[in-house]
Image (cartoon, grey):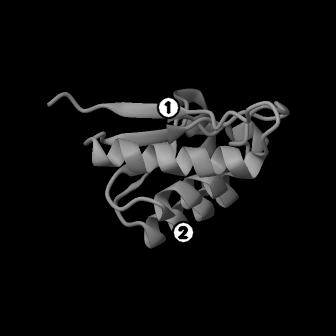
Amino acid sequence: MIPLSILDLAFINEGSSAAEALHRSADLAAHAESLGFRRFWLAEHHAMPGIASAATAVAIGYVAGATKTIRVGAGGIMLPNHAPLAVAEAFGTLDALYPGRIDLELPRVLWRRFLSDLSG
């Protein structure tokens, strides 16, 4: 079987809330898991009132808690928006809670800056 993934933005439907959008994301991830999907990605977008996944690490933890085997991650954490050490700690904690199931993607240029910032 070809490994399939889902990229979710946790859209907030008209008349709905961010909490309801995140519940739908968790339900979608559980359904994808039951169908044999390999990964469930959440997108990081800020200042967009119709998207509930701005706090990506928090959303990933919620979705991982609602599933058992599917890998859950961020399609790209924008390091200029975050302290690199905080990102490393948040995703390290998620990996401790959900071993081997958390994915973190960093754009190549940002990855170099991330490593540089961590080394001082």
Mark 1, other Cα within 10 Å: few <14 / some 14–19 / many ≥20 = some
Residue 37's place in the image compared with 99, above or below, is above
Real-space Cα separation, disc 2 to disc 1, in angstroms: 22 Å
Residue 80 relative to residue 91: left or right: right
User: In the picture, which quadrant includes the N terminus?
Assistant: top left
Badge count: 2
Q: Quadrant of residue 5?
A: top left
Q: Quadrant of residue 101?
A: bottom left
Q: Which residue is mark 2?
A: 93
Most distant residue in the front direction:
15
Q: Which residue is mark 1?
A: 7
Relative image position of residue 114 (x, y in whole percent) = 61, 44
101 and 117: which is toward the camera: 101
- Say what amino acid the circle numbered 1 marks: Leu
* Residue at x 56% of width, y 44% of height: 25
Label 2 SS: helix
48 and 89: which is toward the camera: 48
